Amino acid sequence: MAGTQPAAKVELTGTVRESSHRTAPHVTIRGLTKRFSDATIYDNFDFDIPRGKLMSVFGPNGCGKSTLINMIAGLFPVDAGEILFDGQPLSSIKFGYVFQNYREAMFPWLRAFDNIAYPLKVMGVPKAERNGRVEKIVASLNVKIDLNLYPYQMSGGQQQLVSIMRALIVEPEILFLDEPFSALDYEMTLFMREQLQRIFVETATTTVLVSHDLEEAVYLSDRILLLSRHPARAVEFVHYDAPRPRTLQTMSESDFINIKAHCLDVFQREVRKG
Amino acid sequence: MKRFEALLPFVGVAVLLMVWSLTVWARVVDPVLLPSPVATFRAMWVGMTSGKLGVDFLKTVERTIYSTAIAAVIAIPLGILLGSSEKVYRSVEFLIDFFRSTPASAMFPLFLVLFGVGDRTKISVAAFGAGLVILFNVAYGVMNARKTRILAARVMGASRLRVLWDVMLLESLPQTFVGLRNGVSLALVIVVVAEMFIGSTDGLGQRVFEAQQLFDMPDMYAAIFAAGALGYGLNLLFLTIERRFVHWSGK
C-alpha cells in the first residue's frame, strides 16, 4: 500500500505529517445510503467525524442514530457509499464497540477478566501478554470490581464497565457506544458518565456515542451531531468546549444550559416536521 | 419453621405410604394384587442385594447409557452443523419433526430385521429415539444463540469458525442439556419396553413382565420402583452435570 503512494508524501517530515494527521477528520463518510424495507434511512449522506473528540449522535426516535454507528462499525452492511478511517477501510483498523444490552453482549461462561481479554485472544495474543494487558487497563482505570466473578454475578453498571474495558483492551483508534447507559438506573448512569469521561480524558480516543438523553449527550461531548428525521441529514453540528473534567456543577453553568436549550429547540423543530 | 420446610418433600411420600398401608390393612383390594409396603420393599431389598433384580437393574442402566451415549455422539455434532445454518435446518426440519413424532416402538420390527434379536436392536431403537430429541434441541440451541453475542464476537474480528466454536457452541449448551435429559428419559422408556416384548432374558422390563406372568406381585412392584428410581436418578445425574458445567444456564 505504502509503495503505491506518491513520492511527495514520503518527503514530508514527521512533524508536518503528524500535525496534518491531527487536524484531518478521523472518519470520512461519503454518499452513505441505507434503505430498510419500509423507509430510506440514509440517502447520500456525507459526514466527517473529527479526531480525538467525543461526539454524540442525537435525533428523533427512529431517525437512524444507532444505524449510523452500526454501519460505521460494520455491524450492518451499507447499501451504497464509503466509510474510511484515515483513508483506510474498517478491516485495517482497531476499534471498540459497546452494546446497549450488556447482558447479551457479555459472555456469561467467561469470568469478567476473561471477557475483557477475549478480543486479544481473537487477535492471537499469547495468554501471558493478555493477562498483563488486562491487569494494566484495570490498574489505569482504577477499577474496583472483583474480576473473578461471572457477568451474571455483577450489577448492571459493573457489567457495562467490564464491557467498556473489553472494548478498550485492544487500544482502539475509535470507540463506539450505542446508548450504553440506557439500561441502568439514574444513580448508576451518573457514575458511569464519570467513568466514561475519565476514560476519554486519559486516552483521548475518538469516541462516538449514541444517546437518547440530551443532558448526557451535551455533558459528555465536545461535538453533538443533531440528525433530522429519516432520511437523516446532519441538521447541526454543535460545538461544546467546556473544560474537563466536567462535574455536576458544569450542568448549572449558563453555557451548558444554553447549548442544551439550543439542541432541544433544533430537536423539537425536527420532530414537528414529521 | 425453616426445619419444617425442609421436610416438605417427604410429606407426599409419607401420605402415599399411609394410604397404601391403610388400603392393605382394611383389605379394600385383594392382598394378592396389592402387597403391603413392607413386603414390597423387602422384595426390593432382597432382589437388589442378592436376587436377580440387581442384575436386571444394571443391565437396563447399561443399555440406557449406551443408547444415550451413541445418540449424543451422533446428534450433538450433527445438531451444531444443522443449527449453524438456518437454511440447512429448515430443509430437514420436516424429516426431523416427522421421525421425532413417530413412536419409536413402531420401529421395533424394522430394527429387528436390521439387527436381529438382541442388545443391538434395543440399544439402536433407543438411540434412534433419543438421538432425534437431542438433535432437535441442539440445533435449536445453536440457532437461537443471542444475536448480540454473535455480533459482539464478530465486531472483535472473530472468524465464522471461531464464532461457532466460542459463542454458538456455548450458547447452545443449556438447550443441549434439555435435550440430553429428555433423551435419556426417552431412551429408558424404549429400553424397558424393548426388554418386555422383544425376546429378552434380562433387564427391568423383562423382570416386571416375568413377575407379572408368575403372579409374584411384591417382585413386580419392586421392579417398577427400581425402574422409577433409575429414571429419577438419571435425570438428577444430568441436572447435576448441567449445574456444574453450564453454570450460567437460566441466568
Image (cartoon, coloured by chain):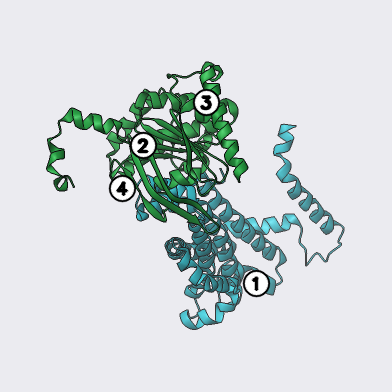
Chain colours: A green, B cyan
Q: What's the chain of the residue with tag 1?
A: B
**For mark 1, does the 10 Å Cα neighbourhood hold few (<14), some (14 to 19), or many (20 or more) residues?**
some
Assess whether mark 3 and mark 2 are in contact (beta carbons under 8 angstroms).
no
What residue type is disc 1 on?
A: Phe
What residue type is disc 3 on?
A: Ile
Q: What's the chain of the residue with tag 2?
A: A
What residue type is disc 2 on?
A: Ile
Q: Nearer the viewer, residue B168 or B13?
A: B168
Q: Which numbered disc covers residue A259?
A: 3
Q: What's the chain of the residue with tag 4?
A: A
User: Real-space Cα distance between discs 1 and 3?
Assistant: 86 Å
Q: Which of marks 2 and 3 is in front?
A: 3
Assess whether mark 4 and mark 3 are in contact (beta carbons under 8 angstroms).
no
User: Real-space Cα distance between discs 1 and 2?
Assistant: 72 Å
Along the horizontal axis of the image, is A90 left or right of B93?
left
- Element on which disc 1 rests: helix
Q: Residue A202 location in percent, x, y?
A: 36, 24
Label 4 belongs to which residue?
A91
Label 1 belongs to which residue?
B209
Mark 4 or 2, nearer chain start: 4
Q: Residue B42 location in percent, x, y?
A: 68, 56
Q: Is B204 above or below relative to A153?
A: below
Q: Is A166 above or below relative to B147?
A: above
Q: Residue at x 48, y 36 (%)?
A: A236
Q: Is B190 above or below relative to A31?
A: below
Along the horizontal axis of the image, is A117 left or right of A163?
left
Q: Residue at x 52, y 51 (%)?
A: B174
Q: Residue B159 location in percent, x, y?
A: 34, 52
